[in-house]
Amino acid sequence: MKDHLIEKAARVLRGNWKEKFTIPCEGLYPFQWNWDAGFIAIGWAHVDMKKAKTEIRSLLSGQWSNGFIPQIIFHKESDSYYPGPEVHGAHRSPFYPKDIKTSGITQPPVLGFVLEETLRISNNKEIDFVKEVYDRVFDYSQYFYQYRDPESEGLVYICHNWEAGTDNTPVWDEVWKEMDSPDYDLPRKDNTHIDAENRPTNREYQHYIHLLELFKQWNYDDRLIAEKSPFLIQDPLFNAMLIASNQSLIRLGKQLGKHEQVDLLEQWTNMGIESFNRKLYDRERHAYVYYDLRNQKSLNYVSSSSFAPLFARIPSAERAKKMIETHFNTGEFSGKEQDFYLCASFDPTHERFDPKRYWRGPVWINLNWIVYRGCKRYGYESLAARIKADTIELIRDNGFYEYFDPRKEVQRSLGKGYGGNNFSWTAALLIDLLNETNKE
Ligand code: GLC
């Protein structure tokens, strides 16, 4: 069974391979996405190391001269996707690369820990590759502390919901309420591929595009964005990914003798962990939440992102225990009235929970992988085993979908997932879970 599933997953990856990078999904996402590329590289590392390295090099080919790595690298033209490079208009930035088109926003910075995973999967053979790309991945971390930490506290902001990776989480409803975006007529393509009830609404898309319009007016100048953007959020998932990447870069840097870089990474990371626990932890809800820097207030919602700090070893053992006891096993994420697959992307007891719509409730495999690893890091073996078993069952019984319904009964009767099928990171991370070479 295991080998058969790994072979099926590898077939999904091979099907999405486009000469030098892997698309997340045919039709729906025809370019290279930043954090997708990271998860995909982990999958490739198990089945074809050369492709894993090419995937990472291709992502780095879109890096800007200030270290920034964009959310999308438009390696080639495609008319199946909106918004393309002209709508993003990122060439207005003086840091924009010369020979390649990219968007001007980023995504959760997973690349640092992806490098360490790749090295581990190769049994330390790929150290020369790590050496080759290390400085560029370091520059990406440095970019955040240079440009996106206006209060010098080790926590960085995101300025667009697409940067979060969790595009339409109900948390952003708070921001949209304050925004008076024009009523753009949008030539959306996503709804031609996927049922509209599983995707963000038109009004939400108008806000997404409006933010891009503002960034264009400001020539993607980070200083102006920090000063004026209506969307300026410290997100627990994004910051946890950055800190986890820094931690990997510290370990790798020590191996490579990169003393100055390691010193800086340690400073940023220590400060970040301290601020994270002070500012983003909600003591009533026993979970990490969001901070709205623009309006200087916490956004106290619990989502799967709330548990990502476990992955970066941010909470104390005591805090981790409280968090896990509150939300899992008999907590709301396990389902109060009916059995739930772990892990819903948004608090299932909240009125804004929608089990079918994208990041407002469905289970996503990359978040499951992050929370699974986090639980293992704190010794919660049986919860980790449950997340792993749920993940495997969802994919084995329904296919390599983009997201799934957390309600067990509903999902079982559907027999398929939601969103795109043959989705790359679903396949890549299943390969990693089934191989488990990554004993820690
Ligand atoms: C969607 C997801 C985002 C992902 C992208 C490509 O926009 O919300 O996280 O990176 O698709 O798969």
Image (spheres, helix red, strand yellow):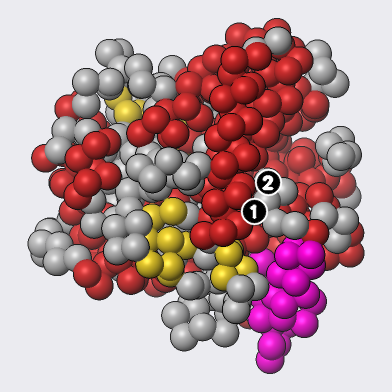
Residue found at the far bottom of this picture: 337
Dot 1 corresponds to which residue?
A: 309
Residue 428 falls in image quadrant? top right
Left or right: residue 80 compared with residue 422: left
Q: Which mark is residue 237?
A: none
Residue situated in front as seen by the camera: 273 or 233? 273
**Residue 17 drawn above or below residue 326:** above
Residue situated in front as seen by the camera: 260 or 229? 260
Mark 1 belongs to which amino acid?
Answer: Pro
Dot 2 corresponds to which residue?
A: 312
Mark 2 belongs to which amino acid?
Answer: Ala
Query: Mark 2 packing: few (<14 Cα in 10 Å), some, or many (20+)?
Result: many
343 in magenta:
yes
Residue 414 falls in image quadrant? bottom right
Residue interval drawn in magenta: 318-345
Which SS class for mark 2? loop
Residue situated in front as seen by the camera: 416 or 147? 147
**Picture quarter with the C terminus:** top right
State if disc 1 and disc 2 touch (CB < 8 Å): yes
Give me the residue at 70% from left, 10% from top.
Answer: 257
Q: CA distance from mark 2 to mark 1?
A: 5 Å
209 in magenta:
no
**Residue 118 drawn above or below residue 340:** above
Left or right: residue 174 compared with residue 362: left
Question: Where's residue 41, x and y in %?
Answer: 63, 30
Which SS class for mark 1? helix
Residue situated in front as seen by the camera: 58 or 244? 244
